[in-house]
C-alpha cells in the first residue's frame, strides 16, 4: 500500500480511537472547569484561538470563564487547559518548570528551525547545564562590549534609509518588518558568530535567511499551517519522513551551520573573543569532559541565537516604529528626549531608567502589546495541582481555588492575552507609554493628572517588568539583556534621525512562529507593516 493510502486508511481509525479516548477523558479530566460557549464540532475552540487578533479572543474568554478555563480540542482532541492566572503561571514557569515541557508536537519543529539548543532541551539537569554554559555570553560585562557592533548596524541602517529618502523626493514607504529583520540579523550575526551577514545592505546571504524565516512564519499563520499542526498532533511520526516541506523547515538552520563551520575551519575566530561562538569554542577545548562542548552542539547554539534572536527583536522593533508613526506626539517627545543626550549612549545609560524615561516606557509598552511569542503550549509531565490567585466558577456553580491536572494535559499560555488583560492594564489596547511613568520623578512631563499607572506587583505576572514577554523562571529568555540593549539602540538611532508617519493602514496580528502584522483588507499579501519615513 502506498504511503498516501496508508495515511488515508489510518486517519479514520485514529479519529475513532481518539474520540473514544476523548469521551473517556472528558468524564474525569477538567470536568468541573468551565469552557467557553460555541465550540465547533470539528474544530472545537482551536480554530477560533488560531484566528485570534491582538489577544481579543483570549480576553473575551477570561471575562466569560475566568483566568483559567478549558477549551475543546479540534478533531476530538481532549480538552485543553488555558491559563492566564498569575499564581498558576508562576507555579508552571517558576516553581515547577521541568514538569511542564514543550508540547511533543513542537519539539521536532523547534529542532528543525533552531537546532538542539536551549529552546529545545528538556529536563532539569540537561537544561541547567546548557544554560550555565551559555549564560556567560550574555552577562552584563559581555553585553556592554557588544555596543560597537550594535551601533555599527544601527548607523548602517539609518544611513541607508537616509540615502533612500534623498533619492525618492524626501520620503519612502517601507514595510517595517523588512526594515527591522535585516538589522537584527546583522547584529546577532556579529555578536554570536563574529560574522556580518550584510543583510542591511542587501547581501544575497542575508536576504535568503530573512526571507526564508519570513516564509516559515507566514506559513504558520495560514489555515494550511494550522491544519498541518493538527495532523502532526495525530501522526507525529510524519516529521521523520523525508518530505520536501519538512526538509525546507531546516534550510535556514543548515545554512547557518555551514557558515559557522567555515568560520571555525578557516580560523576566523578571535582568540579571547567575546562573541558567543568564541566563548563556546573555549568550552570545546576544556580539558574537563563534564564541561566540554562538542562542535555539533556549538553550531546548534549559534543557530538558535541567530534564528530566534533576530526575529523576536525584529518583530517588536517593527511594531514600535509603527506605533510611533501612529502617535506623532509621542514620537516627537521621544525625539526631543534622545536629542538632548550628549554623545552616544552606552549600555549603562540605557539600563538607567532615569536617563531615557520615555524611551524605556515606549519600549516596555510595545513589548507588552506585541510579545513575539503570543502563545505557548506546555504539557504536564506528571500529575500536579495548579493553585489559582483568583478562584474560578466551576461548571457546577462551585468556586474552584485550584485545578488538578493529569499527566499529558495540554496547556495553552496566551502571553498576549495576559499582557493585555483589562483587569490588570485597564485600557490594554491603547498604546500609552505614560502608564510606566506615573509616580516617577518628572512624570508630569509626560503624564496627565489622575492618569492610571501600573497595578501593584503582586497583581501582575512574575515576568520581567510584570509582563510575560520574556517568560519567567529558569527558562526565561537568556538573551534578554542583549535584546533590550539592541532594541533600544535601534529605536534611539532611527528616531533620532528619521521621522515615521502613519500610512493609514489598519493592522491586525496573527501568530505563527512569532507574532506578526498584516494589513486589514490585504491579508492575502501576508506579513506587512507599512510606514512612511522622511528625514528628521
Image: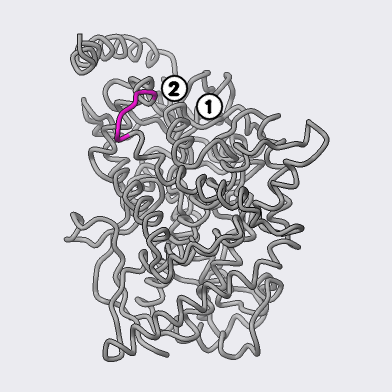
Where does label 2 land, which residue? 30
Label 2: state its secondary structure: loop
Quadrant where the C terminus sits is: bottom left
For the point 58% across and 62% down, which residue is it? 190
Q: Which residues are magenta?
A: 240-245
For the point 58% across and 43% down, which residue is it? 299
Image position of 355 (left or right of 407): right
**Tags 2 and 1 in contact by the CB under 8 Å rule?**
yes
Dividing the picture into quadrants, the one containing residue 436 is bottom right
> Could you say where residue 180 lies in the image, as x and y percent from the top left?
42, 66
For the point 56% across and 22% down, which residue is it? 381
Residue 241 in magenta? yes
Q: Earlier in the sequence, mark 2 or mark 1?
A: 2
Q: Is residue 462 visible?
A: no
Q: Which mark is residue 388?
A: none
Image position of 404 (left or right of 22): right
Where does label 1 land, which residue? 403
Amino acid at each position: 500500500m502506498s504511503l498516501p493510502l496508508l495515511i488515508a486508511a489510518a486517519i479514520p481509525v485514529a479519529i475513532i480511537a481518539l474520540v473514544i479516548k476523548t469521551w473517556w477523558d472528558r468524564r474525569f479530566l477538567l470536568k468541573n472547569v468551565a469552557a467557553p460557549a460555541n465550540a465547533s464540532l470539528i474544530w472545537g475552540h482551536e480554530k477560533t484561538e488560531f484566528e485570534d487578533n491582538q489577544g481579543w479572543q483570549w480576553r473575551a474568554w477570561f471575562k466569560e470563564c475566568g483566568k483559567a478555563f478549558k477549551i475543546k480540542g479540534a478533531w476530538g482532541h481532549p480538552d485543553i487547559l488555558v491559563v492566564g492566572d498569575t499564581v498558576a503561571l508562576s507555579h508552571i514557569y517558576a516553581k515547577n518548570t521541568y514538569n511542564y515541557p514543550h508540547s511533543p508536537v513542537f519539539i521536532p519543529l523547534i529542532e528543525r528551525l533552531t537546532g538542539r539548543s536551549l529552546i529545545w532541551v528538556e529536563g532539569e539537569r540537561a537544561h541547567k547545564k546548557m544554560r550555565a554554559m551559555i549564560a556567560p555570553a550574555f552577562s552584563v560585562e559581555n553585553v556592554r562590549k557588544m555596543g560597537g557592533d550594535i551601533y555599527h548596524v544601527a548607523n548602517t541602517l539609518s544611513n541607508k534609509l537616509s540615502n533612500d529618502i534623498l533619492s525618492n523626493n524626501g520620503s519612502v514607504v517601507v514595510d517595517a518588518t523588512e526594515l527591522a529583520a535585516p538589522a537584527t540579523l546583522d547584529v546577532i550575526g556579529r555578536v554570536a558568530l563574529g560574522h556580518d551577514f550584510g543583510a542591511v545592505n542587501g547581501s544575497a546571504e542575508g536576504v535568503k535567511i530573512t526571507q526564508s524565516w519570513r516564509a516559515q512564519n507566514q506559513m504558520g499563520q495560514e489555515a494550511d499551517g494550522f491544519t498541518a499542526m493538527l495532523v502532526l498532533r495525530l501522526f507525529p511520526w510524519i516529521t521523520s519522513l523525508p518530505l520536501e516541506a519538512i526538509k525546507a523547515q531546516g534550510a535556514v538552520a543548515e545554512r547557518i551551520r555551514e557558515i559557522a563551520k567555515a568560520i571555525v575551519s578557516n580560523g576566523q575566530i578571535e582568540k579571547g573573543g567575546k562573541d558567543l561562538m568564541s566563548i563556546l569554542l573555549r568550552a570545546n577545548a576544556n580539558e574537563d569532559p563534564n564541561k566540554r562542548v562538542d562542535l555539533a552542539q556549538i553550531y546548534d547554539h549559534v543557530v538558535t541565537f541567530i534564528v530566534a534572536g533576530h526575529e523576536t527583536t525584529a518583530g517588536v522593533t517593527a511594531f514600535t516604529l509603527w506605533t510611533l508613526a501612529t502617535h506623532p506626539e509621542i514620537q516627537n517627545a521621544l525625539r526631543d528626549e534622545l536629542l538632548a543626550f550628549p554623545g552616544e549612549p552606552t549600555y549603562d545609560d540605557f539600563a538607567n531608567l532615569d536617563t531615557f524615561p520615555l524611551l524605556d516606557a515606549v519600549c516596555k509598552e510595545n513589548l507588552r502589546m506585541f510579545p513575539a511569542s503570543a502563545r505557548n503550549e506546555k504539557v504536564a509531565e506528571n500529575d500536579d495541582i495548579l493553585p489559582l490567585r483568583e478562584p474560578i466558577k466551576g461548571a457546577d456553580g462551585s468556586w474552584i481555588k485550584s485545578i488538578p491536572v493529569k499527566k499529558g494535559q495540554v496547556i495553552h499560555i496566551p502571553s498576549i492575552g495576559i499582557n493585555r488583560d483589562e483587569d490588570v492594564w485597564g485600557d490594554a489596547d491603547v498604546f500609552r507609554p505614560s502608564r510606566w511613568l506615573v509616580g516617577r520623578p518628572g512624570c508630569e512631563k509626560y503624564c496627565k493628572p489622575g492618569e492610571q499607572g501600573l497595578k501593584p506587583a503582586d497583581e501582575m505576572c512574575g515576568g520581567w517588568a510584570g509582563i510575560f514577554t520574556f517568560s519567567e523562571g529558569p527558562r526565561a529568555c537568556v538573551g534578554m539583556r542583549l535584546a533590550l540593549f539592541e532594541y533600544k539602540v535601534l529605536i534611539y538611532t532611527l528616531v533620532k534621525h528619521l521621522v515615521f508617519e502613519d500610512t493609514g493602514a489598519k493592522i491586525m496580528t496573527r501568530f505563527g512562529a512569532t507574532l506578526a502584522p498584516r494589513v486589514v483588507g490585504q491579508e492575502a499579501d501576508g506579513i506587512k507593516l507599512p510606514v512612511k519615513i522622511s528625514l528628521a
